Image (tube, grey):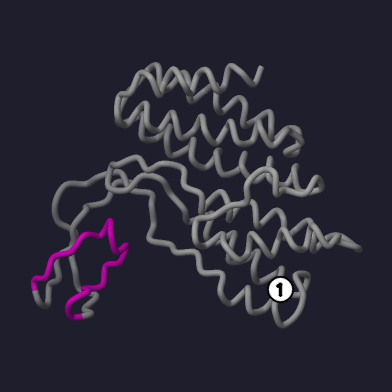
Amino acid sequence: MEIRGERECKECDHRWSYYETGSVSCPQCGSLRSVGVGDRERHTATQTDLDLSAHRAAVGDGSIRDAAPALKSDLRDYVRQTGYIRGGELLPLGDTPLAAHELLHAVDVVARSNRPTDDEQLYVITLLRRADEGERPAPDAVPDSMVDARGLAYAEAIDAYCRDLSTWLDDNPNPEGRTTLETLSNHRKRVEALDGAVSLAESEALVEAARELHTAVVDDDLDALASARDTLAALF
């Protein structure tokens, strides 16, 4: 949606950036009586922080299975509200959304298992410890039983990113970027059709291609566009 980037308080006349706060309440006096001013810009990036501290404590006091319902609910809220266009600016695909998507799937694997392995439980705890700080485990740290979970999680994160990227390209046409986006989307659909059963290298390649495509269209960088295409072509 398109939103006016500034708010003006009708009580104290203070102005602030809605893109930064995501709130209509005045940060100066607290009044809810404000109006939007300035030009409208495309905006999907809500001000949503991922805070997993309560869930870390819950796992410490109990088990992953017991903590799973509340954790999964908060993760779903976070990934649903995460957007990639801020005031008309296209943002890159960050590590926090990727880790959040992966933690959601990894928790589900452990919660549904009658006998989760030590490696699986440790992996969930590792994700839980660092996901809200924008850190995700390296591929060589992923247990074999979690490879598909990562593949599906990354495909879902890239799907959300591609939707916003497509919207951004509607406002900022780039035919070559659009074509490359379609190729990326086709690879993502394949991963989803396979329920994430692809190699860790392929999952990382799709993330890399999404990031290269961001650089290509935002900076009009032909080298980044060629790199994204090469990355995707290597997957065939």
Residue 184 in the image: above or below residue 141? above
The residue positioned farthest toward the left in the image shown: 13
Q: Amino acid at mark 1?
A: Ala
| Viewer-proximal residue among 99 and 77 | 99
Residue that carries the numbered disc 1 in the rendered image: 67
Residue 32 in the image: above or below residue 169? below
Q: Position of residue 51 (x, y in %)?
A: 51, 69
Q: Where, by quadrant of the figure, is residue 122 drawn?
A: bottom right
Q: Position of residue 108 (x, y in %)?
A: 75, 58
Helix, strand or loop for disc 1: helix
| Viewer-proximal residue among 137 and 128 | 137
The quadrant of the rendering that contains the C terminus is: top right
User: Which residue corresponds to the image point at 52% horizontal and 23% vertical from the top-left?
Assistant: 182
Q: Position of residue 227 (x, y in %)?
A: 46, 21
| Viewer-proximal residue among 130 and 236 | 130
Tell me if residue 14 is in the magenta stretch.
yes
User: Which residue corresponds to the image point at 44% horizontal and 17% vertical from the top-left?
Assistant: 226
- Span colored in magenta: 13-29
| Viewer-proximal residue among 58 and 21 | 58
Left or right: 115 in relation to 102: right
How busy is the neighbourhood of tag 1: few (under 14 within 10 Å), some, or many (20 plus)? many
How many marks are shown on the rendered structure?
Answer: 1
Left or right: 180 in relation to 44: right
Q: Position of residue 217 (x, y in %)?
A: 35, 27
The residue positioned farthest toward the front in the image shown: 140
User: Which residue corresponds to the image point at 61% horizontal and 42% vertical from the top-left?
Assistant: 154
